[in-house]
Amino acid sequence: MKMTFRWFGEKSDTVTLEQIRQIPGITGLMGFLDYKAAGEVWEKEEIEKYITPIHSAGLACEVIESVNVHEDIKMGINKRDEYIENYKTTIRNLASFGVKVIVYNFMPVLDWLRTDLSYLNPDDNSESMFYDEAELEGISPLELVKRTADGSKGFSMPGWEPERLKELETTLAHYADVTPDKLRENYKYFLDAIIPVCEECDIIMACHPDDPAWPIFGLPRIAHSFEDFEKIIKLHDSPRHSLCICSGSLGTNLSNNIPDIIVHFGGMGRIACLHIRNLKHMGYRRFRESSHLSSDGDLDMFAIVKAMYDTCPESYVRPDHGRMIWGETGRPGYGLYDRALGAAYLNGLYEAIEKQ
Ligand SMILES: [Mn+2]
């Protein structure tokens, strides 16, 4: 297990590299250029500027997240070949700086969704992200985007980049004709084009699941269950085509057996990394993100770490969204304290399993 931490860059994160370096067991980051629009090439100079301070701080940066796939590629229209060429260049550019894994998703338009980014837990006054499907009734996607931006405390939120959501209504209309099968066909077209480049330059693509784990606003979503992953893995036969298992995303639907999913796809060598966090269900499609501890939520963290230990122990892992505790303010989900506690807890579980 390579324990890592998500970091948004010097100008965009409240957490410093030194603080991350001081968390026990953290060896590297899962990095992110938060200002890049989907479809743009990540230029070498930009990557160098982001990665050099990380290396100077004594941390690795072998995983990059959210190299967003342009909607034209997902919809299979207009300029998709041009955007695929850009994606290939980005893959080559990232590889030249020692990046090994790229986490991405193939979710139409909205890649993750919460209805409250700072929900107050009355038990202990901590704040965390919260979702209640009932609140989406009668609200348009556009209103939701506005609400998310208003709740983000001025921080950029991955997946909610304004330029990406600008043409939301037009894009949503386009998706009316895209069935899940059509989306998979477009996904295959993308993989067939980029995976050979990954083979050439030693990069693994890791697909992140839908969050929450069901379709929203009538959009086709194809990555939120064991069966979905089986279909995805069959789209292109290469170990370079892999998964990022996110327990908090898959766990929004309790019929997903996350340890079983890890054992199956980890055993096939198709898990490159994991986001591990816990959540507490409060009703039908209503939940809040909890601390990482098993007993604080509905997921069995021991079983998740054990499945990883047994089948894909070389994976990159990071504690995922944390709560806001101890008076910290910052980007919702991405403060220092609760994620550091999460990392320490996951490292403890791993050590116990290893020594057992
Ligand atoms: Mn995740």
Image (tube, rainbow, N blue to C red):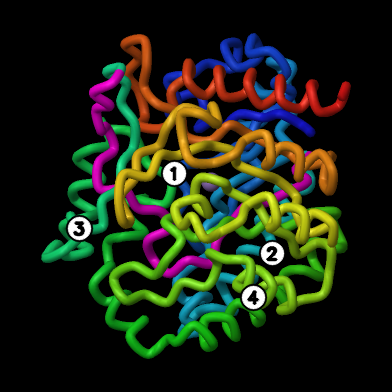
Amino acid type of the residue that numbered disc 4 sits on in the rendered structure: Phe
Q: Is residue 221 magenta?
A: no
Nearest the eye: 67 or 45: 67
Q: Which residues are magenta?
A: 98-123
Would residue 104 be seen by someone viewing this image from the given angle? yes
Amino acid type of the residue that numbered disc 2 sits on in the rendered structure: Lys
Q: Earlier in the sequence, mark 1 or mark 2?
A: 1
Amino acid type of the residue that numbered disc 3 sits on in the rendered structure: Ala
Q: Is residue 99 magenta?
A: yes
Q: Which residue is mark 2?
A: 88
Q: Which residue is mark 3?
A: 134
Q: Earlier in the sequence, mark 4 or mark 3?
A: 3
For the N terminus, the quadrant is top right
Q: Secondary structure at mark 1?
A: loop
Q: Is residue 275 left or right of residue 314?
A: left
Q: Which residue is mark 1?
A: 35
- Tag nearer the camera, 3 or 2: 3
Separation (CA) of disc 3 from disc 2 = 41 Å
* Tags 3 and 2 touching, CB below 8 Å: no
Residue in the picture at 31% in, 60% down: 165
